């Protein structure tokens, strides 16, 4: 199968089953592109996380664009990006047409409620897998704790945190 078609179909599958947003798709990307096809490394996956978080736009699109480009250049990024959004685009169009009819339906609410903990599990699996790939020195530990603190308690935006630690990383590389 040509790589571009494989990218489209794989990201279509990821986009179709990743309930809960971009973070929920991260374990699927790990499984498909690191473990199954060995197209990207764990380090490239960590780079994907950093870039997807720090660039404008949804994480799902940014991740698909990054992986697609790494594998097949511009056309790969286009195929992956279209693949990841097409199911959501069609699905949300249908759901928006039916939402008013079913928004008070108890069964629909139960189905949606049952998906929330699964989504959290997907996100935690990606976090755990990524955490085990980091070489944990004192800088990494301080950066992790302080970034979590700034994001969670001070509500500093993720872009600001990436910018701050990017500057710190540049300064440390000059020493």
Image (cartoon, rainbow, N blue to C red):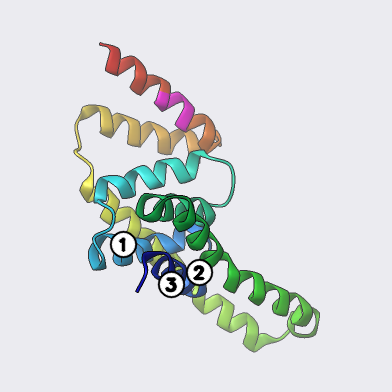
Q: Which residues are magenta?
A: 162-166
Nearest to N terminus: mark 2 or mark 1? 2
- Residue shown at the point (76%, 82%) measured from the top left: 98
The x, y position of residue 159, in whole percent, is: 53, 34
Choose between 28 and 86: the one closer to the eye. 86
> Which residue is the extreme one toward the top?
175
How many C-alpha atoms fall within 10 Å of the one at disc 1: few (<14), some, or many (≥20)? many
Q: Is residue 159 above or below residue 16?
A: above
Choose between 69 and 44: the one closer to the eye. 69
Q: Is residue 119 above or below residue 45?
A: below
Q: Secondary structure at mark 2?
A: helix
Disc sitting over residue 15 in the figure: 2
The x, y position of residue 135, in whole percent, is: 19, 38
Q: Secondary structure at mark 3?
A: helix
Q: Is residue 67 above or below residue 94?
A: above
Disc 2 to disc 1: CB gap under 8 Å: no
User: How many numbered markers are drawn?
Assistant: 3
Nearest to N terminus: mark 1 or mark 3? 1
- Residue shown at the point (74%, 84%) measured from the top left: 102
Left or right of residue 175: residue 48? right
Q: Quadrant of the N terminus?
A: bottom left
Q: Which residue is mark 3?
A: 118
- Residue shown at the point (59%, 47%) measured from the top left: 57
Question: Within the image, what quadrant is residue 147 found in?
Answer: top left
Q: Which residue is mark 1?
A: 33
């Amino acid at each position: 199968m040509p790589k571009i078609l494989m990218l489209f179909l794989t990201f279509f599958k990821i986009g179709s089953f990743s309930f809960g947003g971009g973070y929920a798709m991260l374990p699927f990307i790990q499984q498909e592109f690191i473990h199954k096809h060995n197209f990207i490394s764990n380090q490239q996956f960590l780079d994907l996380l950093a870039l997807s978080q720090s660039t404008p736009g949804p994480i799902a699109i940014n991740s698909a664009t990054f992986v697609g480009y790494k594998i097949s250049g511009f056309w790969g990024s286009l195929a992956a990006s279209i693949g990841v959004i097409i199911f959501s685009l069609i699905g949300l169009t249908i759901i928006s047409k039916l939402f008013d009819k079913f928004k008070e339906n108890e069964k629909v609410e139960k189905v949606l409620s049952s998906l929330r903990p699964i989504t959290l599990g997907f996100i935690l699996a990606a976090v755990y897998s990524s955490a085990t790939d980091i070489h944990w020195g004192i800088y990494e530990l301080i950066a992790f704790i302080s970034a979590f603190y700034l994001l969670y308690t001070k509500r500093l935006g993720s872009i600001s945190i990436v910018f701050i630690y990017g500057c710190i990383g540049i300064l440390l590389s000059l020493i």
